[in-house]
Image (spheres, rainbow, N blue to C red):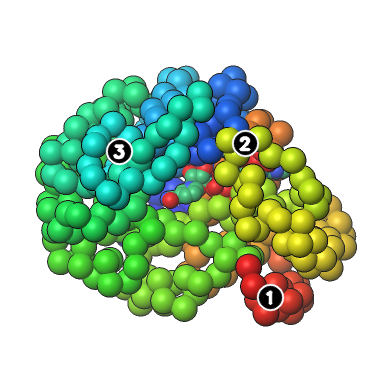
Amino acid sequence: MEYQELGNSGVTVSRITFGSWAAGGWMWGGTEQNDAVGAIHASYDLGVTSIDTAPIYGQGLSEEIVGEAIKTLPRDKVQILTKFGMRWDLAKGDFAMKSKDNNGHDLDVYKYAGRASIIKECEDSLRRLGTDYIDLYQQHWPDVTTPIDETMEAVSRLIEQGKVRAAGVSNYSVAQMQEAEKTLNIVSNQVPYSMVRRDIEADVVPHCIEHKKVVLVYSPLQLGLLTGKMKPGQHFDASDLRNGHRLFTPESITRVNATLNKIRPLAETKNATLGQLVLRWTLAQPGISGALVGARNPEQAVQNARAIDLNLTFEELDYINKQLVALQSAPA
Ligand SMILES: NC(=O)c1ccc[n+]([C@@H]2O[C@H](COP(=O)([O-])OP(=O)(O)OC[C@H]3O[C@@H](n4cnc5c(N)ncnc54)[C@H](OP(=O)(O)O)[C@@H]3O)[C@@H](O)[C@H]2O)c1
């Protein structure tokens, strides 16, 4: 495995980090808890020491699964990346994201990061995770109802108290990062990025390179689409976010697969899967420090972790980039 320090926080993460959103089941058509714990352990055995989670993933379930998984691992060898700022247990007016919980019940989710809320969320996360500190505490989404300095001051208190080692943000624009930096040293921004979703290359990435911030990218397999396993007309559970998703229409799957088929032979000559080639390409892009990859079971987790063993030459990366032009020119 390869590792990356988050600024000079002393927190070092594995460049492939286990993403435990699907482990919580919410928006992924449910979960199998034993598979999820097994997937985390299988990843750890291959050097994936960092685990990304959030309270909203399964409304506490993902954090509990991570807590269960790390019980048998040395705490100081594991990095827990969790988040705050998506509340499902508050009535906060008009800013709700409408969703369903794992049992199909209506769920209103609020992007809220007020001072008292963060302190409460942190205590809840520590309890669910069964630990007394969080390695990287990230604001999940910007909250337009709370001044950024109020949010960052609350995180500063948690750092002073030793409950948090390093502060990060997620889904932040450059302007929001600059605002947050006035109050607190932000070590990372967790943002979406994949072969079919590259908008951060225009702003967030150059900003982070210049200011030595870590970019942690999420959904690098584009929710499984870039493994090449999706077929046009693929069936997804009603509660799976890919059901009706614009990237999972038959047209989109056909178009993406056409590009994947061009790079598949390269994966095969390297004895790798398409997903591994995609992950290695992702980590080779300028300014991308780490990739958060979700896995449903140990088999997927092992395959994803082993992507790090794949070496791509400059010429091979160049060849892949040339094939990707077709994806950029068509609407995603
Ligand atoms: N900050 C944020 O707002 C935010 C948003 C999204 C994600 N994230 C983080 O980023 C992590 C990763 O993103 P993601 O889970 O959305 O997407 P992803 O990593 O692109 O895709 C994960 C999904 O792809 C499939 N998959 C994974 N490995 C595979 C393999 N080797 N072979 C075949 N299929 C495989 C699995 O689903 P199936 O088996 O069901 O196909 C898995 O759940 C999340 O878990 C979360 O920690 C953060």
Q: Gap in Å between the C-alphas at discs 1 and 3?
A: 36 Å
Q: In this view, does 96 lie to the left or right of 117?
A: right
Work out which quarter of the rendered image holds the C terminus and state it: bottom right
Give the labeled residue for mark 1: 330
**Residue 77, relative to residue 266: is it above or below?**
above
Closer-to-camera residue (88/55): 88
- Identify the amino acid type marked 2: Ala
Dot 3: element: strand
Rendering coords of residue 295 (x, y %): 61, 38
Check the image and report above or below for 271 versus 261.
Answer: above
Tag 3 near tag 2, CB within 8 Å? no
At a point 20% along the width and 67% down the height, the residue shown is 179
User: Image quarter for residue 23?
Assistant: top right
Instruction: Give the mark, 3 or 2, whose residue is nearer the N terminus.
Output: 3
Residue ID at (47%, 78%) = 202
List x then y, in percent, for residue 66: 45, 28
The residue carrying mark 3 is 87
- Left or right? Give the position of 121 relative to 62: left
Q: Which amino acid does label 1 sit on?
A: Ala
Q: Nearer the viewer, mark 1 or mark 2?
A: 2
Identify the residue position indicated by label 2 in the image: 238
Which mark sits nearer the N-terminus, 1 or 3?
3
Which corner quadrant of the figure contains ligand 1? top right
The secondary structure type at the circle numbered 2 is loop
The residue at the point 44 percent across, 59 percent down is: 191
| Up-down relation of residue 24 to residue 204 (above or below) | above
Residue 320, disc: none
Rendered view: 94 above or below 301? below
Report whether residue 305 is seen: no
